[in-house]
Amino acid sequence: MKRVRRRVAPWPVLAATAVALASCGVPPTGVIQAGGPATVRSPSITLYFLVNDRLVGVARQAPGTDVGTAVSALFDGPTPAEDANGLVTELPRLPSRPLVQATDAALTLRFPEGVAPLSDLALRQLVCTASSARRQEPADPRTAEPVPTSTAQFRLDVKVLIEGTSWQSVQTDAGCPSPEPVGSG
């Protein structure tokens, strides 16, 4: 018995393959101009300094927006540019930074041993700076959604406990002023 070979014509197979590959649904495009290269800006924190014994919130670029970063930057004091604009601080120089702990209910700032009680203005600087940073922190780092401290109907105050060796103060951020464009940078 003789075998019969069937020959498949290559053109229909090649044509079907070419059509299938060419019609994947993505039209060909040229180079699309979308502007300049992307720029990365550092996050901004708000630090509260004093001008004529009045709290002033100043936006400053920082490596992070967490409470610890903001408190450290506040204790570093005004930059030369901020100083030239009359910004001062009532916060003392410290041997080390306060320990910062955050819970859903409050912030706690614990000072190193031997730090004298802070003035009312220094306390307000700390409370407003720490609370501002807390409002920027994500409640859930996976979603980057900010801590829910306000809604359209009401605002929840951030409670801050500040502790020294033999003293403490509990305050909220009620009454903290909004940031102003004074000496930012």
Image: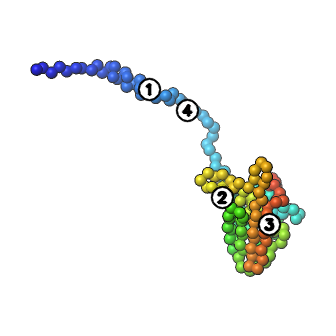
Nearer to us: label 1 or label 2: 1
**Mark 1 is on which residue type?**
Ala
The location of residue 4, given as percent across then percent down, is 17, 19
Name the residue located 71 percent from the left edge and 65 percent from the top edge: 107
Quarter occupied by residue 75: bottom right
Q: Which mark is residue 31?
A: 4
Residue that protrudes farthest toward the front in the picture? 153
Mark 3 near mark 2, Cβ–Cβ under 8 Å?
A: no
Secondary structure beneath label 3: strand
Between 180 and 136, the one lying in front of the other is 136
Secondary structure beneath label 2: loop
Sequence-earlier tag: 4 or 1: 1
Quarter occupied by residue 51: bottom right
Nearer to us: label 2 or label 4: 2
Residue 8 against residue 104 in the figure, above or below: above
Q: Which residue is mark 2?
A: 63
Tell me if residue 145 can be seen: yes
Name the residue located 19 percent from the left edge and 21 percent from the top edge: 5
Q: Which residue is mark 3?
A: 171
Q: Which mark is residue 22?
A: 1
Secondary structure beneath label 1: helix
Name the residue located 71 percent from the left edge and 72 percent from the top edge: 110
- Neighbours of disc 2 within 10 Å: few (<14), some (14-19), many (20+): few
Sequence-earlier tag: 3 or 4: 4
The residues tagged by marks 3 and 4 sit, at their Cα atoms, a distance apart of 57 Å
The residues tagged by marks 1 and 2 sit, at their Cα atoms, a distance apart of 48 Å
